[in-house]
Image: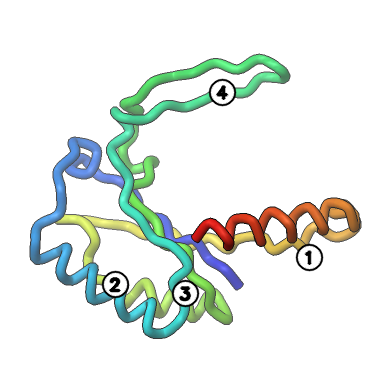
Amino acid sequence: MRFMLILKANQDSEAGVLPSQQLLTEMGKYNEELVKAGVLLAGEGLHPSSKGARVHFSGHKRSVVDGPFAESKELVAGFWLIQVKSIDEAIEWVKRCPSPLEGEAEIEIRRVYEAEEFGDELTPELKEQEARLRAQMNALQ
């Protein structure tokens, strides 16, 4: 099972405050543990929402809103993508994480859908396309 670990933003991360050398060192050790255990698929920090944009969809119409966005606690400051056997294992990995932000921090854990969970709606043609795209993505890495 794949899980996305979503680091919620705070006022400092939204202000572009970068982590200290100590925190970068601690996070590096944690990420190294994830890699050595064979569970880390991806992980990155994100720039503040002031450097981002949102695209709103309404039927065929698209509108763009430039950041920053309100409610920093609803924004994402970074993420990990891990592959483990259960949500309990994902929780255990998150508990081992050093506090990722100065002060209060929160990491949300969300399971990623696997192709087989879409049932009959995922036709053989769509399954083949999914497999082809994943192979192409893996070749780029």
Q: Measured from the top left, where is residue 32 in percent x and y?
A: 30, 77
**Amino acid type at image mark 3:** Ala
Q: Which quadrant: the N terminus?
A: bottom right
Mark 3 / mark 4, whichever is N-terminal: 4
Quadrant in which residue 43 is drawn: bottom left
Mark 2 lies on residue:
97
Q: Secondary structure at mark 1?
A: helix
Mark 4 lies on residue:
56
Mark 1 lies on residue:
116
Q: Secondary structure at mark 3?
A: helix
Mark 1 / mark 4, whichever is N-terminal: 4
Quadrant in which residue 20 is drawn: bottom left
Q: What whole-number distance in Å separates the C-alpha atoms at marks 3 and 2?
A: 11 Å
Above or below, 40 against 130 in this view is: below
The residue shown at (64%, 56%) is 136
Q: Are marks 3 and 1 in contact (CB under 8 Å)?
A: no
